[in-house]
Amino acid sequence: MYSTLLVLHFLIRWLVLAFLVYSIYRAFVGYTQNKTFSKTDNAFRHWTATVAHIQLMIGIILYTQSPIVKYFWTDTKTALQNLELTFYGLIHIFLMLTAIVVLTIGSALAKRKPTDKEKFKTMLAWFSIALIIIFIAIPWTFSPLSSRPNFRTF
């Protein structure tokens, strides 16, 4: 089951990024061009948050099963001295949880705004902040915190 979740996690992470980037693009265009907040815009707002929540649930399951995380919590004092272990044990999950909270708040606020321009502006601001946090939390190949290949073979 763990390996199946890893594959699903791998696929959905790119889906989250694609939805988020496209939603930000739609919000930017809608805001700058004074467009109407359409059913499609609302659907992307909703589905971006939904896909992110699915990814969060899978991520939490993987977090609790990860041998790296288990070691981190078994010997925290020693693990905190290793930046890579600290990244996977604390930093990554904290930043990803924060990003999903920011994304969820932005989605809820945008939904409730009275004007189309305010909906686009709210979505643009909150979703952009969430994307920035996600980019910080990703273990890019060039990251000083932890390095993993962007595309892995399992």
Image: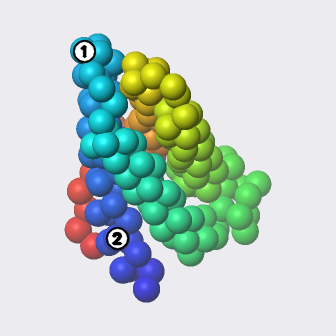
Q: Residue at x 30, y 36 (%)?
A: 38
Q: For this view, does 106 lie left or right of residue 14? A: right
Closer to us: 55 or 48: 48
Q: Which residue is mark 1?
A: 33
Name the element at disc 2. helix
Determine whether 36 is above or below 88 in the image. above
Tell me the quarter of the image containing the C terminus.
bottom left
Does the image show residue 118?
yes
Q: Residues within 10 Å of mark 2 (few under 14, many from 20)?
A: some
Closer to us: 49 or 133: 49
Which amino acid, mark 1?
Gln
Across and down, in percent, residue 83 comes to 57, 45
Does the image show residue 68?
no
Q: Residue at x 55, y 34 (%)?
A: 112
Determine whether 20 is above or below 70 in the image. above
Q: Residue at x 44, y 60 (%)?
A: 55
Q: Residue at x 46, y 63 (%)?
A: 54
Name the element at disc 1. loop
Name which quarter of the figure residue 120 lies in: top left
Closer to us: 136 or 148: 136
Determine whether 3 is above or below 105 in the image. below
Closer to us: 59 or 103: 103
Tell me the quarter of the image containing the N terminus.
bottom left
Mark 1 to mark 2: distance in Å?
37 Å
Across and down, in percent, residue 101 comes to 59, 43
Of mark 1 and mark 2, the one earlier in the sequence is: 2
Q: For this view, does 117 lie left or right of residue 86? A: left
Which amino acid, mark 2?
Leu
Name which quarter of the figure residue 44 lies in: top left
Across and down, in percent, residue 87 comes to 56, 48
- Residue 8: which disc? 2
Tag 1–tag 2 contact (CB < 8 Å): no
